[in-house]
Image (cartoon, rainbow, N blue to C red):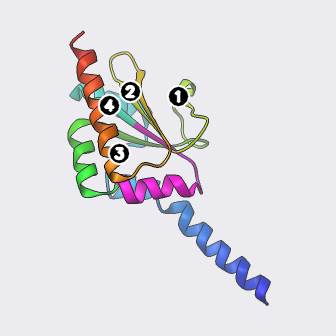
Amino acid sequence: MKNIQYILLFTIFFHFNLYAGSANLVTKMAYNVSYDKALKKAKESNKPLMMVIGQEGCPWCNKFEVKTLMNKKIHSNIENSFVPLTIIRELDQYPKRFKPKGVPTVLFIDPKNENAFYKSFGYKSKREYKIELEKALTLFKENQNI
């Protein structure tokens, strides 16, 4: 009987963990899910593409998405300065050169040449990620002046 309870508990935990992150970024935060469409928007708006790459069932990905990316101040900063895109590493189509070894990974991509000019690896708190966003935006602006 105890084994059945543990299996049920694990199944419930796994189910919520699996869908906690990326679906919320798409439905609540209006993140793009198509690399090509997001790239087109980035070119039109002259904003860098911010590609969040996660994996199904990854607890650190979900924590990063829910605790950091869905924060109102962080989201506002992203919305004003970047074109956000969320990708599931194994499921979604995107250029293979961007496939990371670990998740979560965030790549900041220049829409003109499609080069990743800044990378952020692993879980970041709101405070840490605010700094990451500032660094990425500064690098993008510096590259535009060259």
Q: Which residue is mark 2?
A: 109
Q: Is residue 20 left or right of residue 78?
A: right
Front position in the image: 32 or 138: 138
Q: Residues within 10 Å of mark 2 (few under 14, many from 20)?
A: many
The N terminus - image quarter: bottom right
- The reply to whether callout 4 and callout 3 are in contact (CB within 8 Å) is no
Front position in the image: 24 or 124: 124
Q: Disc 1 and disc 3: Cα gap in Å?
A: 20 Å
Tell me where the magenta segment starts and ends, as one range. 51-69
Q: Earlier in the sequence, mark 4 or mark 3?
A: 3
Name the mark nearer the viewer: 1 or 4.
Answer: 4
Q: Disc 4 and disc 3: Cα gap in Å?
A: 10 Å
The three-letter code of the residue at mark 3 reads Tyr
Q: Which residue is mark 3?
A: 129
Q: Is the residue 141 above or below the residue 107 in the image?
A: above
Q: Earlier in the sequence, mark 2 or mark 1?
A: 1
- The reply to whether callout 2 and callout 1 are in contact (CB within 8 Å) is yes
Name the mark nearer the viewer: 1 or 3.
Answer: 3
The three-letter code of the residue at mark 4 reads Ala
Q: Position of residue 16 (x, y in %)?
A: 54, 68
Q: Which residue is mark 4?
A: 136
The C terminus - image quarter: top left
Determine the image quadrant of residue 47.
top left
